[in-house]
Image (spheres, grey):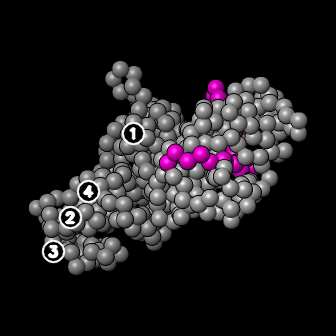
Amino acid sequence: MLALENVSKVYAGNVRAVDDFTLTAAEGELLVLVGPSGCGKTTTLRLIAGLEEPSSGTIAIAGRVVNGVAPKDRDVAMVFQNYALYPHLSVYGNLAFGLKMRRIGRAEIRRRVDEAAEMLGISDLLARRPGELSGGQRQRVALGRAMVRRPKVFLFDEPLSNLDAALRAKMCRHIRRLHAQLGTTTVYVTHDQSEAMTLGQRIAVLRAGRIQQVAGPATLYQQPANRFVAEVIGSPAMNFFDGRIERGDAGLVFDAGDFVLPVPNARSASLEPLVGRPITLGIRPEHITLLSEEQDPRTPEGARGGSPAPANQAAADKLPLAPSATVEAIETLGAECYVYLNTARHTFVARVPAGCAFWIGQQVQWAATVDNSHFFDTTTQCALS
């Protein structure tokens, strides 16, 4: 188990890279730290590895407090973004180097290297040098060098950021499979939310050195603790609309100024005390339906450019359509499209099925599945139940 308790790292000028950080990774867990550049992810990893010392707080590995313990004595293995391979050594030499420094027997070194190479699919590369390898092969060698150590904790510092998208996706699956086989406690740092969602059993979302939320991928997506988490988790990011909760003829409504949407009955009790106060409504792109004004918006086969996605059709059937929005841009991504729109006061994006023939400048009507929406306090940015 890995435990950080009230850990802070303060640099000169009172710069707080890590601020009162408390987090525990269970034995055998794959925990991902995600957030934008400068949020403290790598600093946290370096504190665990012993490459930095905390200004306050304690770090414990397998029940032993390691504050002040040298990196080599912490029993951790770190995989860096730039691979950090020895260019003059063969793949075998790179894999074996750390074991030789620990005076492991030659036969045991050979056994561990062969085992790691087999798991990583690099057995036929052992005689090559790093300069003769592709980026993906070099990354697997870096993984293997950490694996042969058999540490208590693996630390990954954005190890896939130098790879192309297809290879990154493949290596994500590879790392997840290796973790399942090895069962070693792992802390993985990335700025890529897709990588985090793919790999993490739990994900810690960081901002300005502080933890915003720690949860499984599904919980982060469906129940973000605040607006920042809602923005970080999900691609495209959640749409946000500023407005107020008001009383309508049939109950509470969200009034954004240029459109009004009813508040679900399940949310009414918690939002009743906030009537008249500024509120931010968050809606995922997949919960927005686009329908052309030029056809019957209630008839899927009449909707210009194709039918709404089935998950969105319920919204179009039971909710009034908002006033029209203008299509500003379209991103076509194979099986789906992202359609970017604006109204008089808001800019937002909808995810629609591929083949929907919307065009730039088109006027469309839209509806939202408010049952799946999120409400945030505009002042504190915290989620409202």
- Residue type of the residue flagged with mark 4: Tyr
- Residue type of the residue flagged with mark 1: Ser
Q: What residue is rendered at 39% in x and 25% in y?
A: 15
Categorize mark 4 by other alpha carbons within 10 Å: few (<14), some (14-19), many (20+): many
Q: Which mark is residue 127?
A: 3
- Residue type of the residue flagged with mark 2: Asn
Which residue was labeled with disc 1?
Answer: 37
Magenta stretch: give its range.
360-380
Which residue was labeled with disc 2?
Answer: 94
Q: Earlier in the sequence, mark 2 or mark 1?
A: 1
Q: Earlier in the sequence, mark 4 or mark 3?
A: 4
Categorize mark 1 by other alpha carbons within 10 Å: few (<14), some (14-19), many (20+): few
Which residue was labeled with disc 4?
Answer: 83
Q: CA distance from mark 2 to mark 4?
A: 11 Å
- Residue type of the residue flagged with mark 3: Ala
Q: Quadrant of the C terminus?
A: top right
Q: CA distance from mark 2 to mark 3?
A: 10 Å
Q: Earlier in the sequence, mark 2 or mark 3?
A: 2
Q: Position of residue 381 (x, y in %)?
A: 62, 32
